[in-house]
C-alpha cells in the first residue's frame, strides 16, 4: 500500500528522513513541474521553480496541519513561485524566452486541451481550497473517488459532489473567457494532458541539493525567499485580506469617510474611468468599495490581473472576498499619493504612503507602476 503523503511529510519533519523526502519528490515531481511550466512557459525556469517548491516543502514540513492535502499545497506553492519567477524575469529585462516545451505525451493535444491550457492555472487558482484539492487529486493525480474522499475526510458521494461543483466553476470561468466546453470535456482534457514528464535527472538534482546542502544560485535563493514571503502574506490576509492588498496595489487619493449606523461608508467615491493614472486610482477604489472583484481588477493590466488572482485570491470564494473587501475598504483612506513620477509617455510611478495606525494595519511606502494600455491607464505592478 502506498504510504500516505502526510506520513512522509511527518517522517521528514520528525527525523529528517532522506528516503521520505526523496519519495515525496519522486511522487509529485511531474505535478509541480507541470504547474510551473504552464505558467512560466520556459523549461529551465520551470525547473528552477520546481526546485524552489520542494525546498520550501522541506522548510515548511513541520508546520503542516493534519488535514493538509500535500499535492494541493504543492500546486498552490508552485503558482506562487511561478508568479514571482516571472516578475524576476521581467525585472532582469529578459525579453526573449526559450520556446515553450511541448507535452512529452505521445497523444496529440485535443482541441479542448489546446483551448483551456493557457487558462488552466488561473481557473484552478479561483477554486476554494477543498475544491482545488479535489481536482488535483482526481484529475491531476488520477485518484479514484475512494482515495479522494479519504484525503478530504468525507464520503465518496460528497467527494463526487465537490468535484462536480469544482468542474462547474471551471466551466463558468472558461466560458467567461470565450471557451465553451462541457464539464466532461474539461475533465477529460485535464486528466489526459495536465501532467508532463519533468526533465531526466531533475529529481536527483533536487534531492541532492536538499540532502547535501549544496550552494544555490542567487536567483534560486531569491526565488525561495520571496515565495516564502508571498506565502506568509497569503496566510496573513485571512485577517486583512483584500483591503490591505488593495491599499498596496492601488494606493488612494485622499478620501472622505463618514460613519452611518456605526459602520464606515465611502462618502464620495465614483467611477472615474481610466483616462489618467489618478482617475484609474479612483475607479479602483470604487471597484473595491462595491466588493466586486471584477470591477476592481478592471483597473489592472491583463498580466497584473492574472498575478493578483494567483497570489491573492486563490482559495477564496467570491462571497468571502466581497464581504471582506467591503468590511475593510475604509482602511484605504489612510493611504495617499505622495509623488507622481513620470517615467515615459506610457509609464507613470505613483508613490504611496501611509502613517502607522491603531487598527493593526501597517505603515509603509510603496511605488505603484501604472502603464498606458491603448488609451487607458492600468495598474501594472509594484516597484521593488
Image (tube, rainbow, N blue to C red):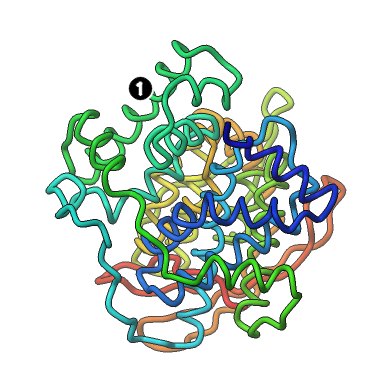
**Residue 91 appears anywhere in the view:** yes
Out of 211 and 158, give the one closest to the viewer: 211
- What secondary structure is marked by label 1? helix
- In the picture, measured across the screen, residue 35 lies left or right of residue 76, that is left
Q: Which residue is tagged 1?
A: 164
Q: Is residue 209 left or right of residue 273?
A: right
Which of these two is toward me, 242 or 220?
A: 220
Q: How many marks?
A: 1
Query: Residue 337 vs residue 148: left or right?
Result: right
Q: Is residue 247 above or below residue 185?
A: below
**Quarter-of-image position of residue 71:** top right
Q: Is residue 305 visible?
A: no
Quadrant of the snapshot with the C terminus = bottom right
Residue nearest the viewer, comparing 346 with 60:
60
Q: Residue at x 41, y 16 (%)?
A: 161
Q: Quadrant of the N terminus?
A: top right
Other residues around mark 1 within 10 Å, as few (<14) / some (14–19) / many (≥20): some
Q: Look at 67% across and 81% down and name the residue there.
A: 216
Position of residue 250 measured from the top left corner of the image (x, y, whole percent):
55, 60
Residue 295: give x, y in percent of width and height.
40, 45
Q: Of residues 171 and 110, which is closer to you in this image?
A: 110
Task: Reply above or below: 214 against 71.
Answer: below
Residue at 27% across, 78% down = 99
Residue at 36% in and 81% down: 346
Q: Residue furthest front?
A: 1
- Image coordinates for residue 175, horizontal then vertical, percent: 22, 38
Amino acid at each position: 500500500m502506498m504510504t500516505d503523503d502526510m506520513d512522509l511529510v511527518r517522517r521528514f519533519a520528525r527525523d529528517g528522513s532522506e528516503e521520505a523526502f526523496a519519495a515525496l519528490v519522486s511522487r509529485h515531481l511531474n505535478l509541480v513541474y507541470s504547474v510551473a511550466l504552464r505558467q512560466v512557459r520556459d523549461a529551465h525556469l520551470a525547473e528552477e521553480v520546481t526546485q524552489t517548491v520542494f525546498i520550501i516543502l522541506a522548510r515548511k514540513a513541520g508546520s503542516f496541519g493534519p488535514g493538509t492535502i500535500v499535492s494541493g499545497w504543492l500546486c498552490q506553492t508552485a503558482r506562487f513561485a511561478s508568479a514571482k519567477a516571472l516578475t524576476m524575469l521581467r525585472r532582469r529585462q529578459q525579453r526573449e524566452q526559450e520556446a515553450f516545451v511541448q507535452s512529452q505525451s505521445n497523444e496529440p493535444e485535443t482541441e479542448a486541451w489546446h483551448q483551456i491550457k493557457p487558462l488552466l492555472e488561473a481557473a484552478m487558482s479561483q477554486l476554494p481550497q477543498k475544491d482545488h484539492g479535489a481536482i488535483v487529486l482526481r484529475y491531476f493525480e488520477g485518484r479514484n473517488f475512494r482515495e479522494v474522499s479519504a484525503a478530504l475526510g468525507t464520503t465518496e458521494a460528497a467527494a463526487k459532489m465537490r468535484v462536480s461543483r469544482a468542474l462547474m466553476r471551471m466551466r463558468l470561468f472558461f466560458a467567461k473567457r470565450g471557451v465553451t466546453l462541457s464539464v466532461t470535456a474539461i475533465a477529460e482534457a485535464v486528466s489526459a494532458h495536465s501532467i508532463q514528464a519533468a526533465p531526466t535527472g531533475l529529481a536527483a538534482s533536487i534531492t541532492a541539493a536538499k540532502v547535501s546542502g549544496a550552494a544555490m544560485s542567487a536567483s534560486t535563493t531569491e526565488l525561495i525567499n520571496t515565495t516564502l514571503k508571498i506565502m506568509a502574506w497569503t496566510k496573513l490576509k485571512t485577517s486583512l485580506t483584500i483591503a490591505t492588498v488593495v491599499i498596496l496595489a492601488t494606493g488612494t487619493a485622499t478620501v472622505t469617510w463618514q460613519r452611518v449606523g456605526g459602520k464606515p461608508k465611502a462618502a464620495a467615491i465614483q467611477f472615474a474611468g481610466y483616462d489618467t493614472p489618478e482617475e484609474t486610482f479612483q475607479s479602483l477604489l470604487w471597484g473595491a468599495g462595491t466588493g466586486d472583484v471584477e470591477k476592481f481588477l478592471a483597473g489592472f493590466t491583463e498580466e497584473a490581473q492574472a498575478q493578483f488572482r494567483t497570489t491573492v485570491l486563490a482559495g477564496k470564494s467570491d462571497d468571502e472576498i466581497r464581504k471582506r473587501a467591503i468590511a475593510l475598504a475604509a482602511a484605504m483612506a489612510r493611504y495617499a499619493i505622495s509623488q507622481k513620477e513620470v517615467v515615459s509617455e506610457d509609464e507613470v510611478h505613483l508613490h504611496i504612503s501611509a502613517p502607522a495606525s491603531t487598527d493593526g494595519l501597517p505603515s509603509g511606502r510603496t511605488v505603484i507602476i501604472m502603464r498606458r494600455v491603448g488609451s487607458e491607464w492600468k495598474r501594472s505592478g509594484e516597484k521593488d
